[in-house]
Amino acid sequence: MFENLSLNKTYQYLLIILAFLMPLTVFGANLIIVTICLLWLFSGNYKYKFHIIISNKLILASVVFFSFHLVGLLWTDDLAWGLHMVHKMWYFLLLLPILFTIVRKDHIRYYITAFLLAILITEIASYLVWFELVAPFKHATVQNPTPFMSHISYNPILTFAIYLVLHEIFLNKKLTNIQFSLYSFFAISMTINMFITGGRAGQVTFFVMLSILIFQILDKQRIKSIITIFMVIPLIFIFSYQMSDLFNKRVNLAITEVINYPEAQKSSLGLRITFALNSFRVIKESPFIGVGTGDFPSAYKKINEINTPHLPTTTNPHNMYTLILTQLGVVGLFSMISIFYYQIKYSFNSKNKFIRDVGITLPILFLVMMLSDSYLLGHYTSLFFVFFSSFLYKDYEKS
């Protein structure tokens, strides 16, 4: 009994440390993950763990999603790349089920607090680089100050952090005046930080997040929510567009690249459009089971040489839906979507408003931002997704 209590206490400390290190360091987070997995694998009580895992449809959907990547190796010519893709997906087979069995409801506030503290550190570092008080380091530049990870990952994660803080401000009636003031300052500073960094997917997701939050604040007042969204979102967009040179340039560039696609095929958005068009040509050849887990690069290269030989080839279409459709077909895409379906389903059934609101917001934001990149492949965003999923969709009464 005392051994179990001691082990559980160790797990909770490790989870809190993981929540803190997750946005800051790949090595540190991976070290904690390996420690948790080894403790779990050698700690026994396997019957209980197995029961917890198979009793949750989300976890089963996650394991099935991973399993399709394994099955997809059967019709893959490039086995080495296939194994590389399988390795990138191992969080869905092992880490999510393991975390799911050890998270505790009464520690959720500690997980989130540790995560937000890490975001505060990243934000401070970002401002120090932006104001040129410290020299740019790691991924950061003065024009795009995202030091600990690329802006592609940073802005979506920052969006979710802003959501968590705003949810506290508007929906936690127990906040003291000091807490309200600190949270408000934090939310404003993070929002400004959102628009001095260059992650367009995160910025789009930010506006989606605000729309969701308005619906949650004005619960069951749909007309009022829609009116508020049409008033607030354009105002914030216009203000950001006028005040942030980087955001202004990124918006103008995106519009120009889309309108002038034939002449701007080598631009960031131009290449993404080309990746999508060529990928769908691959999908047409094998729509149900795809070309295999490892054959996207070779299949795309063949199509690219025929249709757009003047453009570079790619190993990633920068769209999670397109990637899964190409590799595993409609069957694989259905498997991936089922994860988000069960997340939303579990959230709607939750009696806790915070869990329900956050649990609905997480999958919606990912469903949006996966249109612009393969966010379930990247270390920071995939770990972030798996970590929050492990405690938001657990039926604590049954465990």
Image: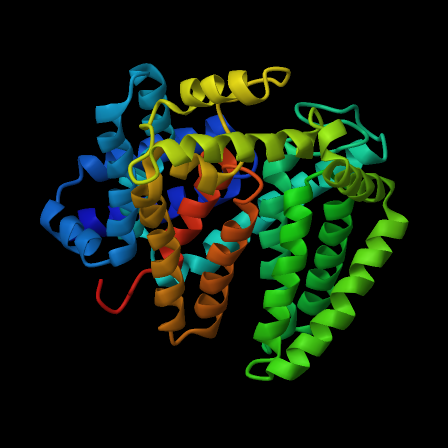
Residue found farthest to the right: 242
**Nearer to the camera, 217 or 354:** 217
Left or right of 252? Residue 294 is left
Q: Is residue 149 visible?
A: no
Q: Residue at x 29, y 36 (%)?
A: 289
Q: Is residue 61 visible?
A: yes
Task: List x then y, in percent, for residue 109.
Answer: 48, 60
Q: Residue at x 46, y 38 (%)?
A: 322
Left or right of 120? Residue 347 is left
Relative to 218, is 306 above or below?
Answer: above
Q: Quadrant of residue 127?
A: top right
Task: List x then y, in percent, for residue 305.
Answer: 53, 16
Relative to 283, is 105 above or below?
Answer: below
**Nearer to the camera, 337 or 239:** 337
**Nearer to the camera, 30 or 267:** 267
Residue found farthest to the left: 47
Q: Residue at x 65, y 77 (%)?
A: 225
Q: How many marks?
A: 0
Quadrant in the picture for the C terminus: bottom left
Q: Residue at x 84, y 44 (%)?
A: 248
Task: List x then y, in percent, for residue 341.
Answer: 37, 59
